[in-house]
Image (spheres, grey):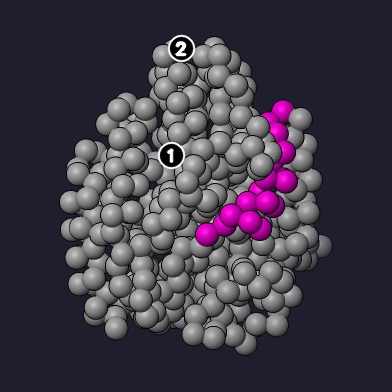
Amino acid sequence: MGNIRTLSGALVGLVTLVAAGTVQAQQTTITLLTAEREDTMQPVIDGFEKLHPDIKVVHQSVPFNDLNAAVESRIGQGDSGIDVIAADTPRIPAFAAKGYLKDLSERAEQIKAGAPNPVDIEQVSFDGKIFAYPMWTSTQMLYFNRDLLKKAGVELPSGDVDKRLTWDQVVEAAKAAQKAGAKWGLEFQQFDRYYQLQALFESAGAGSGLTGDGLLKSDVGSEAWAKTAKWYGDLFADGVAPRGVTPEQTDDLFFNGEVAFLVGGPWSIHRFEAAKGLDYGIAPHPYFKDGKPATATGSWALAINPNTTKLEAAQAFAEYASLNGEGNYLTTANNPVPPTNPDAFKTYAKNMEALEPKIGPVVELINSELKNTAVGRPRTTGFVAFETVMNKSFADIRNGADAADTLKAADRQIDRQLSRLK
């Protein structure tokens, strides 16, 4: 009897081991490459793995400025170690033209059902084909520190788009706040990035910086670009805006109560709500008095590596994060950027509306800016080259280089690079 029990126990153990080994053998692991923090992507990964216990998602995060190089060097060389890629939407034409993104046109019906806004579909398309799943859109707003402005005797900005401040009014208020004790008057969250700064030039009437057939001709050497860039550089030269920080540190300065005004996206609200003692509000993005309101837009989508050997699992994750109301919302749970799926946006808006008595009409403002003032980045196969040159030029101007000379040099460099694409 004792031997039978021992044998039975051994068989049960063997069956258990075999079963566990089978489950482990059947589990597929996919790799997601983004420029996001771990806590941004973890909720959607957890939600997906709960629905798909046979698929494990490994998140690799690289700095924003390194993502282009990672795509170029890895996917461009045929690397199949990445399955799903976060793709900034204006970069899609350049990457698609080089064969770095899988053509998803066979899933067009499902993609359009989950992301019905034609603008979102246009943002992930190139040459009549769809190359990514829409995930987020974006806008920009003006954050202000109530305590610093009250101390300076400055009238608090309104959340009403019809009472939008001009840049001159913001800079005047920022300097007043500094005189009353604020360390910095104004900062831009992404101060060296075309994404955020394009709106300045569009508001001033200088245009996007690209023109011609296929937007493959530079226009940043114009007088209008030089005038606006000088205004921007003077903010740093005059000590209104801080030098010597990274884009990742700009939220910290506002979070710590050191800055009167911050131009940034709605995703920062998650952090600012966690700041003890920070009394802040939101207002419409400023504009130039003789120009027009303009705001940045566009955001990240999810693309598939054409070299992946785990296509089914990769698409299952991308479609959950993009087209499923629950999954798409979870991508924003710790990073409140507007999701593209309508059901996800309803949940997002409901949560944001709960903050309105404290910070102002944030949902109304987001909807209004997306509808009326949003200006997309140029959609051209030359965008990655253009963006790379411009981001460096903005950094040089911010650090004291002559705006007109810097932009003329950038103009020549961009034209040289874009001429190879014609």
Q: Nearer the viewer, residue 286 or 74?
A: 286
Residue found 74% across the figure and 75% down from its top: 113
Label 2: element kind: loop
Please say whether residue 108 is one of the residues in the magenta stretch: no
> Circle 2 is placed at which residue position?
180
What main secondary structure does the magenta stretch of the protein show? helix
Residue at the image point whose x is 66% and y is 58% from the top: 371
- Depth check, front residue: 48 or 6: 48
**Nearer to the camera, 41 or 229:** 229
Q: Is residue 158 above or below residue 26?
A: above
| Residue type indicated by callout 1 | Phe
Q: Which residues are magenta?
A: 358-375
Q: Is residue 176 left or right of residue 361?
A: left
In the orientation shown, which residue stands out farthest toward the front? 290
Residue placed under numbered mark 1 in the picture: 188
> On the rendered image, what quadrant is the N terminus found in?
bottom right
Q: Is residue 254 left or right of residue 121?
A: left
Residue 84 in the image: x percent, y percent? Answer: 51, 69
| Secondary structure of the residue carrying numbered label 1 | strand
Residue 230 visible here: yes
| Distance between the alpha carbons at the discs numbered 1 and 2 | 21 Å
* Residue type marked 2: Ala
Q: Is residue 318 above or below residue 138?
A: below
Tell me residue 36's x, y (percent).
Answer: 49, 51
Residue 328 is drawn in which quadrant? bottom right
Quarter of the figure with residue 184: top left
Tell whether position 366 is magenta: yes
The residue that appears at 55% across and 19% down in the rendered structure is 154
